[in-house]
Amino acid sequence: MQRAELTLSALLDARSAGSEGRAGGAPMLIDRGRAIGFAELAAESRRIATAFAQLGIGREDRVALWLPNVSAWLSCFFACAQLGAIAVSVNTRFRAHEVADIVGRSGARLLVYWPGFKGIDFSSILAEAADTAPSALGAIVALVAYGEDAAPAPRTVAGKPVLPFGALTAGSPRERDDAAPDAGCILFTTSGTTRAPKFVLLDQRAVVAHAHDVAQGFGLDAEAAMLLVPPLCGVFGFCCAMGALAAGRPLVMRPAWDPVQAAADIVAHRVTHANATDEAIVQLLAQRATQPAFPSLRFVGYAAFNPALDDIVERAEQRGLALVGLYGASEVQALFARQDEHAPLAERRLAGGRPVNAAARVRARDPESGRILPHGEAGELEFFAPDSRMVGYFGDAEATRAALSEDGYYRSGDLGYTTADGRFVFLTRMGDALRLGGFLVSPLEIEAVVQEAPGIAACQVVGVPGAAGRVPVAFVILAPGAVLDEAALRAQVAARLAKFKVPQRIFAIDAFPVTPGANATKIQKGKLRAMAQALLAS
């Protein structure tokens, strides 16, 4: 596509036009077995855009999408793009504390949610968010209830009117298109060094350009079909979906991860491509006794989150799947790079690979001297990503300046090295950010909630390997005279944070191990991690 065509509206319109006249149409989505064509999705998104505009939504306004993997997520996203508005991605696993922070700081004016998804009362969570932080819903003009529940949605929540999703899709398609390549289109939350997660802002040009690179770089040809495993609320799932759309190929999806249904979907829809975590792949393989497990699958990218599954590539190989290591970050988008599926197993298992965009560049920098390192020497990975990089951190110019070099490279905070043939290898995070539940989480976010409890003077959180993946462990210093009630404190944290952020154990200690520095005394996170592992093992 030409630069002027790098808008989400142009992308969807091109796919809709290309599907006309085909026998049976061209399904973009297969949502729980229901085929939804490109033209149908485009028309619905334009009707929603009409409704959003009538509610006062325009360029740069934010619309929070607190939805699982359903077609409505994508139709609302494209509706925002047509208006030049910005979708705010909210994880359905988030609870009152996180939702209040994200919706409040983003200044979202609308919030679309599924009130009874998985039997959870999301309306009550919203009400709690408003009670906890009265300004959280301050900019909200209305809530929109996506309806698949037997029980009707409430008419109001926290004093805000609740509109049925059906009312948004009942009007006329919007004719005017305010989409623009440089218009911000989506915010993703990402962990950082501050208490609150940062908002990564992507514009339409970057999303569309990268989607085309993914379509080509991942081999999404005329026979391809993509299984959507990760949630759309994260950049991993989002880029899988956009790549399939750019290729004009079906995206097979379900609201929540279910390995039994996913295995059946792969067979029923002859799925050829999937990208998933190591844990999800193990669960998929357990559903099939055939050899090979899934004959139609010809590309499976994986992200390693569970240290106990370090043999996943070998296990999958025995079942006929050649797993491929990936690399991505919200700031340069997921699926930024991939290993070659025809490479030796020892190479395929490594995270990283070759960037899917020919203009992208990768270098490793010595964090102490600042010099650019030769191939094979590990340092902080920096990425020049002209066609996929973020606009910046929304509302945080200082963090944006810190993340970008003078010559336009993104400083990733990841440790890795480059290779002479144009690839790179990711080794680990250089900082203390935690990978929990498939997401990067700032320990400061968890620490802040723990420290609000009565009797807690200070808290430090580290991540250590657990039985089912990496888990957070908290160390606290008690106030004079206080006694730790671990179960009660964990329950208090669980009421405010997603389950995967709740510390598996909380230990009281007299003092944190520290080391003196030139500018400040630093807590020795490494010693805390070793202590946590020893305590969990005892």
Image (cartoon, rainbow, N blue to C red):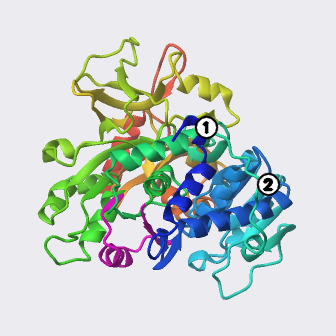
Q: Which quadrant of the figure has residue 496?
A: bottom right
Measure how far apart labels 1 and 2 are at the Cα level. 29 Å
Q: Nearer the viewer, residue 40 or 538?
A: 40
Do callouts 1 and 2 mark residues in contact (Cβ within 8 Å)?
A: no
Q: Is residue 338 shown above or below 471?
A: above
Q: Is residue 309 shown above or below 192?
A: below
Report crowding for label 1: few under 14, some 14 to 19, many 20 or more residues within 10 A (C-alpha): few
Which label number is shown at residue 181? none
Judged left or right of residue 488, residue 241 is: left
Task: Identify which residue is drawn at 21% across, 49% down.
Answer: 341
Task: Identify which residue is drawn at 54% across, 39% down.
Answer: 206
Q: Name the residue under label 2.
A: 109
Q: How many numbered dots are placed on residues in this image?
A: 2
Q: Which of marks 1 and 2 is nearer the N terminus?
A: 1
Is 71 covered by the magenta stretch? no
Nearer the camera: disc 1 or disc 2: 1
Q: Mark 1 points at which residue?
A: 4
Task: Identify which residue is drawn at 15% across, 70% down.
Answer: 292
Q: Which quadrant of the figure has residue 272?
A: bottom left
The type of residue carrying mark 2 is Arg
Residue extent of the magenta highlight: 249-275
Q: Which quadrant of the figure has residue 90?
A: bottom right
